[in-house]
Image: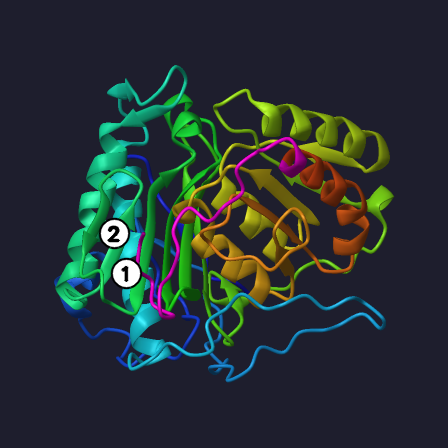
Amino acid sequence: MVRSMVFSTTVPLRFSSIPRSVPPQFQPNQRLPLDFTNKIQHGFGGVPFLRAKPTRKLCTKAVLSEIPNQKQYPKIGAQSTGPIPPSQLIQVVETAAKTGAEVVMEAVNKPRNVTYKGLTDLVTETDKMSEAAILEVVKKNFDDHLILGEEGGIIGDTSSDYLWCIDPLDGTTNFAHGYPSFAVSVGVLFRGNPAAAAVVEFVGGPMCWNTRIFSATAGGGAFCNGQKIHVSETNLVERSLLVTGFGYEHDDPWATNLDLFKHFTDVSRGVRRLGAAAVDMCHVALGIAEAYWEYRLKPWDMAAGALIVEEAGGTVTRMDGGKFCVFDRSILVSNGALHEKLLERIGPATEKLKSKGTDFSLRYKPESSRAKLD
């Protein structure tokens, strides 16, 4: 039975002591670094959290089921976490994501102070406050790492092997409207490849906000609330539920994806557009959707969710079928079984965009296998 993380809208956000994606190096009631666990409790208001038996151990290699004759695509996860042990890295990643989620939960039922980065591209004070809280956690633990935040841009040591990609509030428009599809997303790359990730998804809605946390380490499997998760085994497009997204610019990629949306709506059980990339990818990892694709995303949109999908047994590529990295400008994630079939339509559409001059170059180019910027 999974331990739920249930939050009242009138009390501070509290996380249960759930199993982690790697075995913790502390006792259940021992204080974590940064005094984070002075807010961690096993329940509130006399309502206990449901508890799962913490029986799982760190996977040294993810155990993924493969369908016979299914095409294999290059993996995107880091070969290792470098000199920092996976257990230490994921502990800080999860702590950072939870810290940002506390800020978001505190504001979720309050009036929004909204400003605009573009005509319809919103930003709220909560975005900025969440990012500041996450940065504090990262800096206190790894002050020599490079950090890329959606709101604050690049900070830190550009010679570092580590790059943190932070989306303090993925799905800001949904948050501003109280629509339940937004999250805090934290991913860290080692030498340009995803090494550890955590996404805290907000679910429910006004008067009943809850959260669940997805996490993964490269080679260590993917988890939701401490329970191992796996993509679906659906291998027919007509039996699949798909997800996509649209950017704020109504350009050629936007129009192309509208055509893809129409096509797959006709041939599948449906295509959803929820508005939060990290959430969409976690839903594929959880097995409740079969695939997700989108053009024009940023590294902080993809770094965490992509690793979680891969560690849940899924496949991650660019929308032309090429090897993916988080600096790319398109992404297709799936349960693996449907990947080739989806690419039969998505691939040519993307190649057509390339022939028309659409920019699909890397946003950032890691140099000498390090996560350096141009």
Who's the residue at 68% across and 39% down the image?
350
Q: Considering only vertical position in the picture, is 298 above or below 308?
A: above
Label 1, label 2: how far apart the Cα atoms are: 6 Å
Residue 5 seen in this snapshot = yes
Relative to 229, is 5 on the left or the right?
left
Q: Position of residue 251 (x, y in %)?
A: 56, 22
Who's the residue at 56% across and 32% down the image?
274
Relative to 139, is 189 on the left or the right?
right
Closer-to-camera residue (86/17): 86
In this picture, which residue range is highlighted in magenta?
Answer: 354-374
To which residue does mark 1 refer?
95
Q: Position of residue 133 (x, y in %)?
A: 19, 48
Closer-to-camera residue (196/94): 196
Q: In the figure, residue 160 lies in which quadrant? A: bottom left
To which residue does mark 2 refer?
99
Q: Is residue 363 magenta?
A: yes
Q: Are marks 1 and 2 in contact (CB under 8 Å)?
A: yes
Residue 147, labelled with which disc? none
Look at label 1 and name its amino acid.
Thr
Q: Main secondary structure of the magenta part?
A: loop
Look at label 2 and name its amino acid.
Thr
Q: Is residue 251 magenta?
A: no
Residue 13 seen in this snapshot = no
Q: In the figure, residue 250 lies in which quadrant? A: top right
Closer-to-camera residue (143/255): 255
Q: Considering only vertical position in the picture, is 10 above or below 200?
A: above
Who's the residue at 22% across and 41% down the image?
152
Q: Secondary structure at mark 2?
A: helix
How many other residues sit within 10 Å of disc 1, few (<14), some (14-19) or many (≥20)? many
